[in-house]
């Protein structure tokens, strides 16, 4: 197992809990430890969590660099099996975050390309949680790219598959994104139903 596993887990918990500056600081601590110990997996984890934290802080140029670095460190033989331990694949999730970042930076084709590739890889691994995780972010990429028509069926799929697999967080995410897409498409009543359902689902998970 990589060094600093506890730091990575704690940083991820802060990230999911909305405590982004704490996640960023812990990711930087993890990177320092990984460099000291020359642990490539810990480096991958650190760059990935730091990139996600920077994205949430709006520091998109730095987020892009960190996420690219994480992807470059990924070795399929070494790291793909870790999805069974960490509940998500490091490459697929880093790449789909990169897709959103690129779309927000105006690089629409590259952003959509990264997100679609991330989904294809998650499907290749046949890892259900990674697939549902990535589906939600693919829908988000399309929305950031100004394409709610493309986002809508992806959000639908995220909701259906997350329900089937028992992943309430991604059910809520899919509902929120479908609501957003419906707002953009002028389907306001249906959008309101989805957004309210998303809030209720998040309350059940304890996220809100």
Image: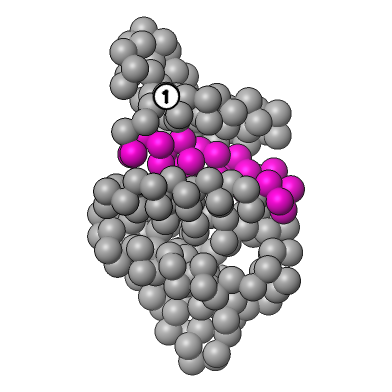
Q: Position of residue 148 (x, y in %)?
A: 38, 27
Residue 47 lies, with reference to residue 115, above or below; the image says below
Residue on which disc 1 sits: 149
For residue 133: magenta? yes
Image side of residue 114 versus residue 5, left or right: left
- Toward the top, the furthest residue is 189
Disc 1, SS: helix
Q: Residues within 10 Å of mark 1 (few under 14, many from 20)?
A: some
Residue 84 lies, with reference to residue 29, above or below; the image says above
Quadrant of the drawing holding the N terminus: bottom right
Q: Position of residue 40 (x, y in %)?
A: 57, 81
Q: Name the magenta segment's main secondary structure.
A: helix
For residue 111: magenta? no
Q: Quadrant of residue 92?
A: bottom right
Quadrant of the drawing holding the C terminus: top left
Identify which residue is drawn at 60% across, 40% down: 132
Residue sitting nearer the eye, 20 or 146: 146
Residue sitting nearer the eye, 5 or 75: 75
Q: Position of residue 201 (x, y in %)?
A: 51, 26
Identify which residue is drawn at 31% across, 13% down: 186
Identify which residue is drawn at 51% across, 29% down: 155
- The answer to whether any part of residue 139 appears in the image is yes
Q: How is the image coloured?
A: one colour
Identify which residue is drawn at 49% across, 92% down: 36
The magenta stretch is 123-145
């Amino acid at each position: 197992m990589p060094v600093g596993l506890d730091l990575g887990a704690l940083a991820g918990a802060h990230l999911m809990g909305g405590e982004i500056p704490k996640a960023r600081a812990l990711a930087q601590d993890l990177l320092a430890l990984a460099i000291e110990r020359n642990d490539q997996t810990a480096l991958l984890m650190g760059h990935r969590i730091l990139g996600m934290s920077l994205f949430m802080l709006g520091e998109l140029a730095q987020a892009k660099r960190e996420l690219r670095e994480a992807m470059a460190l990924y070795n399929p033989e070494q790291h793909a099996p870790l999805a069974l331990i960490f509940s998500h694949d490091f490459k697929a999730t880093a790449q789909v975050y990169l897709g959103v970042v690129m779309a927000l930076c105006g690089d629409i084709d590259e952003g959509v390309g990264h997100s679609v590739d991330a989904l294809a890889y998650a499907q290749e691994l046949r890892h259900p949680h990674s697939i549902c995780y990535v589906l939600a972010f693919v829908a988000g990429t399309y929305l950031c790219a100004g394409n709610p028509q493309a986002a809508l069926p992806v959000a639908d799929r995220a909701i259906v598959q997350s329900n089937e697999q028992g992943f309430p967080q991604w059910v809520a995410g899919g509902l929120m994104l479908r609501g957003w897409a419906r707002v953009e498409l002028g389907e306001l009543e249906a959008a309101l139903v989805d957004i309210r359902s998303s809030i209720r689902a998040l309350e059940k998970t304890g996220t809100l």
